[in-house]
Amino acid sequence: MESKTIALEDAQDIVVARNQVRSIAAALGFRAIDQTRLATVASELARNVIKYAQRGRLIAQPTESAEGRQALRLIFEDRGPGIPDIAAAMSDGFSTGRGLGFGLPGSRRLVDEFKIESEVGRGTRVTVLRWKA
């Protein structure tokens, strides 16, 4: 299965991202619970892109280990304002908006690997990976 890029420009794109990620995970044979976890992460992180950067993209990359174990990598990229304090942003309850502050730390708990790179004034890239059980 090939990588898929989804533009993130408005609220409807959050729904598209969620549904596409669920569909890709299902096609790869992920369990229903993991499909839901990945769809939730896609929804949360796509919402952050639109809320804070107005636009960006999601790249969904089916991948596998050298041993043949399958995974789904999701990359969220934007050219928004960036995150001045990643450590604070990753703590439960921290929010620069009016949210509950569970988006980034909650997403981290739903995946096996989570990496965030951000530069103030240049944008943010969040990469997550979930291994197939």
Image (tube, rainbow, N blue to C red):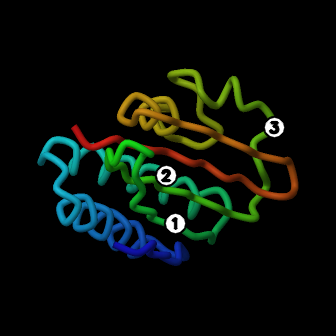
How far apart are labels 2 and 1 at the CA level? 9 Å
Q: Residue at x 64, y 31 (%)?
A: 89
Inspect the image, locate mark 3, and give the three-letter code of the amino acid beneath it.
Pro
Inspect the image, locate mark 1, and give the three-letter code of the amino acid beneath it.
Leu
Point out the tag, 3 or 2, that comes first from the N-terminus: 2
Q: Is residue 3 above or below residue 124?
A: below
Q: Which residue is mark 3?
A: 84
Q: Which mark is residue 58?
A: 1
Considering every residue shown, the one lying at the far right of the view is 121
Badge 3 density bin: few <14, some 14–19, many ≥20, Cα 10 Å? few
Inspect the image, locate mark 2, and give the three-letter code of the amino acid beneath it.
Leu
Q: Residue at x 84, y 47 (%)?
A: 119
Q: Residue at x 65, y 56 (%)?
A: 52
Q: Where does residue 35 sit, x and y in percent of width and height?
A: 21, 51
Which element is circle 3 on? loop
Badge 2 density bin: few <14, some 14–19, many ≥20, Cα 10 Å? many
Q: Which residue is mark 2?
A: 45
Which element is circle 1 on? strand
Front one among 12 and 127: 127
Q: Nearer the viewer, mark 3 or mark 1?
A: 1
